[in-house]
Image (tube, helix red, strand yellow):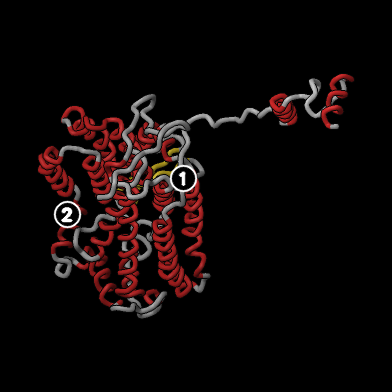
């Protein structure tokens, strides 16, 4: 029965289960694939990002916390010194005295956010221009008024500059950041040639020398020392010859001695440093009052604002160069130790960022910024506790001052930008060398490049 039905289907030409008009299994599969291909729309061309791509992660929060904590302490101390003193003497609002520093803090915070979000490698594009502009401003501040540029002379020093309607600024503060950026760019391009005399040491001196000399002519010994130490640190970290630097130490010491002897007030500061208790009172007043303020504070301090009340200890420049003495007086040994601990935390995180930087330029830049800010803090605190003569530089993030605070905030933003690309368990040898092409920008892995392989932990 079944056979006859199948045969009738074949004879009549009707489609049966396996008739000649029925598609085979392979035909049905090809038809289904073609129908699926027609049903699925053609893939759209995806736009690939041009240029190198970066792997980012969270910024260094400990560095950020240390910076913000120092700024908050500085605002409290400025309010405590200038604000409370104004309220006691004139009956005014104590918060008015702290408003300018609060405004500069807000501006500095914006600068930090901007540089934190910016790829730090773009700083290489403007490093030469920033360095030359810094030199130009340092020259202008030593000259008479020229058009909108009006230098300000105070206490025998020409350190401040007014440009048109803008607030007065300290060109040496801008030069710190400009010099660090340009040196990082130049040292990264030099590579191993930095250890040579004619390819490393002499060009380094020609770059750092003019900036240091112009600041010394203001005169500003403290900033001169900070610039020299920061530049020297970067040079040695980049692979500069230690022996060559040691040979230059006698020349540097002789230059400092001649510089101090040429300035009468610098000689007075050295005399006061050697024996502040027997020096003339009008010359040793600031140093002696700073020591007395630290001793009066004891362990827990006398309390915020108490130093400005009747019966308190008068302290010159309490909101500026000697603000650490004010911290010791009102917050005691605990407050002073907290400030020192925050700077140590800042130094540790800065060094870690430099060691784990994604490239040579980033590592040198982080090392330079960390050295600059920490050396400046060390010198300021050493002056207050009479470890070195008075130099007249602010305590970073804490002392009153607009240009210093904004520039320091910008430097921290650069450190945070580098920290967002730091490599885990990185060491200095893990930093990728620069490519040397174009303007010498550092190595950036492209979309098809292999990732940087870290050395195994030993």
- Depth check: give the residue in front, 144 or 38: 38
Residue at point 42%, 49% (across, down): 416
> Quick check: 402 left or right of 360?
right
- Vertical side of 226 occupied by 50: above or below: above
Q: Is residue 386 left or right of residue 362?
A: left
Seen as rendered, the residue at the extreme front is 1
- Residue at x-position 31% and y-position 55%: 347
The image quadrant of residue 208 is top left
Nearer to us: label 1 or label 2: 1
Point out the tag, 1 or 2, that comes first from the N-terminus.
1
Residue 257: tell me if it is visible: yes
Q: Residues within 10 Å of mark 2 (few under 14, many from 20)?
A: some
State the residue at coordinates (56%, 30%).
Answer: 48
Does 53 sit left or right of 223 as displayed? right
In the image, residue 449 lies at what x, y percent? 42, 32
Which of the pair 169/302 is nearer the observer? 302
**Residue 139 place in picture, x, y as percent:** 33, 36
Secondary structure under tag 2 reads: helix
Instruction: Say which quadrant the N terminus sits in.
Output: top right
Q: Secondary structure at mark 1?
A: loop
State yes or no: discs 1 and 2 in contact (Cβ < 8 Å).
no
The residue at which mark 1 appears reads as 56
Q: Which residue is mark 2?
A: 267
Q: Quick check: can you spot residue 403?
A: no
35 is higher (above) or lower (below) than 388: above
Categorize mark 1 by other alpha carbons within 10 Å: few (<14), some (14-19), many (20+).
few
Percent from the top left, x then y, of residue 273? Answer: 17, 62
Return the residue nearer the eye: 371 or 435: 435
Residue toward you, 21 or 64: 21
């Amino acid at each position: 029965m079944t056979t006859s039905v199948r045969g009738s289907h074949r004879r009549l030409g009707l489609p049966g289960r396996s008739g000649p008009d029925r598609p085979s299994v392979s035909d049905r599969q090809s038809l289904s694939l073609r129908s699926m291909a027609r049903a699925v729309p053609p893939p759209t061309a995806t736009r690939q990002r041009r240029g190198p791509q970066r792997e980012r992660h969270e910024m260094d929060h400990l560095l950020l916390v240390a910076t913000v904590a120092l700024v908050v302490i500085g605002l409290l101390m400025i309010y405590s010194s200038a604000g409370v003193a104004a309220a006691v003497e004139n009956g005014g609002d104590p918060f008015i005295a702290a408003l300018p520093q609060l405004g500069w803090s807000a501006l500095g915070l914006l600068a930090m956010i901007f540089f934190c979000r910016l790829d730090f490698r773009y700083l290489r594009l403007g490093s030469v221009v920033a360095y030359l502009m810094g030199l130009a401003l340092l020259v202008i501040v030593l000259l008479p008024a020229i058009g909108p540029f009006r230098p300000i002379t105070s206490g025998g020093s020409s350190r401040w500059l007014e440009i048109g309607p803008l607030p007065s600024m300290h060109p040496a503060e801008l030069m710190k950041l400009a010099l660090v950026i340009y040196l990082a760019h130049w040292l990264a391009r030099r590579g191993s040639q930095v250890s040579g005399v004619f390819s490393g040491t002499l060009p380094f001196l020609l770059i750092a020398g003019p900036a240091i000399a112009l600041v010394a002519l203001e005169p500003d010994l403290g900033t001169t020392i900070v610039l020299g130490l920061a530049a020297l640190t970067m040079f040695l970290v980049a692979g500069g010859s230690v022996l060559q630097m040691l040979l230059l130490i006698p020349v540097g010491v002789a230059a400092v001695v001649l510089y101090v002897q040429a300035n009468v007030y610098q000689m007075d500061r050295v005399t006061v440093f050697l024996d502040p208790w027997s020096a003339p009172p009008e010359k040793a007043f600031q140093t002696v009052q700073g020591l007395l303020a630290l001793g009066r504070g004891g362990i827990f301090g006398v309390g915020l604002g108490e130093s400005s009340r009747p019966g308190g200890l008068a302290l010159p420049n309490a909101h500026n160069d000697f603000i650490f003495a004010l911290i010791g007086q009102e917050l005691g040994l605990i407050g002073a130790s907290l400030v020192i601990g925050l700077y140590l935390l800042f130094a540790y995180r800065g060094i870690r960022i430099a060691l784990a930087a994604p490239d040579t330029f980033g590592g040198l830049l982080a090392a330079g910024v960390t050295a600059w800010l920490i050396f400046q803090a060390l010198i300021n605190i050493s002056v207050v506790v009479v470890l070195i003569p008075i130099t007249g530089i602010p305590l970073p993030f804490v002392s009153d001052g607009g240009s210093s605070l904004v520039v320091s905030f910008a430097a921290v933003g650069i450190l945070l930008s580098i920290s967002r690309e730091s490599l885990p368990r990185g060491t200095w040898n893990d930093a990728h060398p620069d490519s040397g092409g174009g303007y010498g920008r550092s190595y950036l892995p492209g979309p098809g490049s292999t990732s940087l392989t870290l050395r195994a932990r030993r």
